Amino acid sequence: MMSRLDSMAFKALNDGVNRWALFFLMLALPLVGQVLEDSIPRAPEGRILDEARLFGLEPEILDELSARISSISDRTGYEIYVAIFDSLIGSDVKEQSQWLQDAWVGDAAGVVLVLESDSSLFEIAWSRMPDAMSESGEKVPVLGSSDLAPQDQITILNSILALRSDEKSSAESAQTLIKTFADGIDEAFKEVDEAQPARWNVRVLMLGTGLLAGMLLVGLLVGASIRRSDRKVADRLIFPRVTVGMRLGAQSGGGKISSRSFDVLPHEKA
């Protein structure tokens, strides 16, 4: 009997502890979210955040890289950011890149490169465009006018992975990585810009061909109308020669006249 009472008391105590734990957790969640939000730095004006201070002794290199990235971003409309951390505590490069992507880029087209200098790990967070559904039910990625295709993203990633450096945490290594990253984006957009005139020329050629065909059709219709008018003018109406009766001296014509008269009946006279 006592063991049963002890079990019931333990269960009630456990339920009470769970309720209090849930209550304190609900109170703590907004505080945790606020802490995480405050821990995310603001978007850097020069588009490169160097919290690891790799370029502290060479600020001119940082200014050069910032000018390069800003020029590409302003020209293409593609948001580009780089964040360099010394060592990430409580998160990794993947989580940090997603947080910065949401905070710095949002719904716009863009990318954030996060580099952890101590481990030489990096992560690239590209803009996540919504997929469209085809008629067959297959997901098809939708790209905006200022976005990069998945194949271009893979090419840029492969070019960075191909880099080799003995001092991975050095400023020189970070400079090479950022430069390769920026050059890859710039090259991808140049290929898109070069392809635009070709598509435009094809469109102009098709439009010109259509206009020429329309003008030719109008010319044929006008020519047919003129030829029909010429045929009507060329037609001559000739009245046949016929023999008519002799006129009887009338001024305006001739012909035959018939006249009849009637007398009054006898019974009508009476």
Image (tube, grey):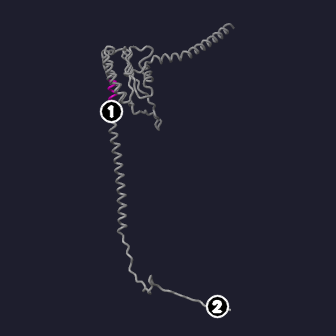
State the image coordinates of residue 238 (x, y, percent, origin top left): 37, 75
Residue sitting nearer the eye, 29 or 2: 29
The image shows residue 135, relative to residue 254, as above or below, that is: above
Image depth: mark 2 or mark 1 in front? 2
Residue sitting nearer the eye, 21 or 221: 221
Q: Mark 2 packing: few (<14 Cα in 10 Å), some, or many (20+)?
A: few
Circle 1: residue type? Glu
Residue lying farthest right?
1
- The stretch of residues the image draws in magenta is 180-194
* Residue displayed at 36% across by 58% down: 222
> What element does badge 1 sit on?
helix
Circle 2: residue type? Leu
Rendered-image quadrant of the C terminus: bottom right
Where on the picture, by quarter, is residue 264?
bottom right
The residue singled out by tag 2 in the image is 265
Q: CA distance from mark 2 to mark 1?
A: 120 Å
* Residue displayed at 31% across by 13% down: 57
State the image coordinates of residue 67 (x, y, percent, origin top left): 33, 23
Position of residue 137 in the picture relative to residue 265 (left or right): left
Kindly report the secondary structure that dominates the magenta region of the rendered protein. Answer: helix
* Residue displayed at 44% across by 18% down: 40
Position of residue 18 in the picture relative to residue 205 (left or right): right
The residue singled out by tag 1 in the image is 191
Where on the picture, by quarter, is residue 96?
top left
In the image, residue 189 lies in the stretch drawn in magenta: yes
Position of residue 142 in the picture relative to residue 264 (left or right): left
